[in-house]
Amino acid sequence: MRGSVVCLGEILVDCFVTAVAQEEAQSLPGGAPANVACGLARLGVPTEFIGAVGDDRWGHALKQLLADLNVGSLGVQQLALPTRQVQVLLNEQGDRSFAGFGEATLPDDFADAHLQATAIEPALFAQVKYLVLGTISLAYEETQAAVQHAIALTRQQQGRVMVDINWRPMFWPQPATAPTRIHALLLQADLLKLSAEEAIWLFETRDPRAIAAQFPNLDGVLVTVGAAGCRYWLGGHVGELPGFTVDVEDTTGAGDAFVAGFLTQLYRHGHHSLQTAETARAAVRFASAVGALTTTRAGAIAAQPTPKEVEAFLFLHR
């Protein structure tokens, strides 16, 4: 059942720089939707990725990485534009901030800003249960059209849409347009994940039930609070789970790993599992464990855990 989950959006290269020495430490693959796709595949969920990279060294390497990790890559478009490189500053606590791009100076100078809707094959959605979207794709006209096309193809198969806000203003040529575009997308979503900071920015509240009240179409809202855990509203059930205590090396991709863990539970147990308080809470706990484990190693993709690692971690923290 290839493509039970389809992830659409950016795949790029994170160039990590230590904030103290201002020296580049390493370059690793990243991009929120790609991180989710790789995390799902690592956890055993059939996944397709749709995005655009350059016809360059990094573009070919990223496409090969997806194949190596058993992520479907037939939806990857290679364009005559550079693959995006993002400079990521890491502080001594492992927290990151985004400092800029590579040689290009404008946010839309990269291949991932020009994903072509007409080149997306409907066959990639033949078995889709969930479509995962970030919001960076809304920043560019061509990728925004690709998002709408993907939603339409997902609905044709009775699939559901999950949106992870992933607010990164540096990616937006016109950041002021973001709230309107994001709200319009959420009216087409079934599940929403966002950080506490993003919740305050968009809705002036961190209460998932209050956010859900603004979008009756949503089945669930997850508000992550970093190491402090997650507040959620799922199928009418409200809850809060504290975070797991781990030795943090790098927080990059932790939220994406959380999304992968959450969707893994829905894939395994069905969307109806959100209808009971116990199974909804179990899905959040599993997602939190995946996110926590990802922070214990460097890199958004290389750090993602296997099912056995998650099971062992949850056993120790039972």
Image (spheres, rainbow, N blue to C red):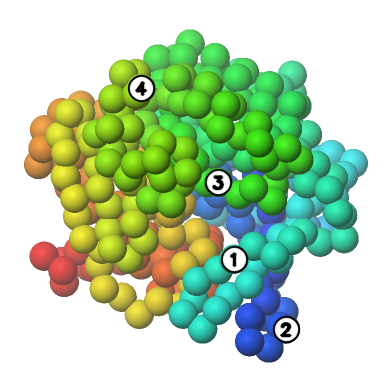
Q: Is residue 281 left or right of residue 172?
A: left
Which residue is denoted by mark 1 in the rendering? 97
Label 1 residue SS: strand
Residue drawn at 64 percent across, 62 percent down: 98
Q: Residue 290: horizontal and vertical position, in percent?
A: 34, 59
Question: Looking at the image, which is closer to me, 19 or 143?
Answer: 19
Query: How far apart in space, not on screen, are marks 2 and 1 (Cα)?
Result: 15 Å
Q: Are marks 4 and 1 in contact (CB under 8 Å)?
A: no
Q: Are marks 2 and 1 in contact (CB under 8 Å)?
A: no
Which residue is denoted by mark 3 in the rendering? 167
Label 4 residue SS: loop
Which residue is denoted by mark 4 in the rendering? 215
70 vs 226: above or below? above
Work out whether mark 3 precedes mark 1 in sequence or the reverse, and give the earlier one. Answer: 1
Work out whether mark 2 precedes mark 1 in sequence or the reverse, and give the earlier one. Answer: 2
Query: How far apart in space, not on screen, are marks 3 and 1 (Cα)?
Result: 12 Å
Residue 105 visible? The answer is yes
Work out whether mark 3 precedes mark 4 in sequence or the reverse, and give the earlier one. Answer: 3
Q: Residue 165: horizontal and vertical position, in percent?
A: 49, 41
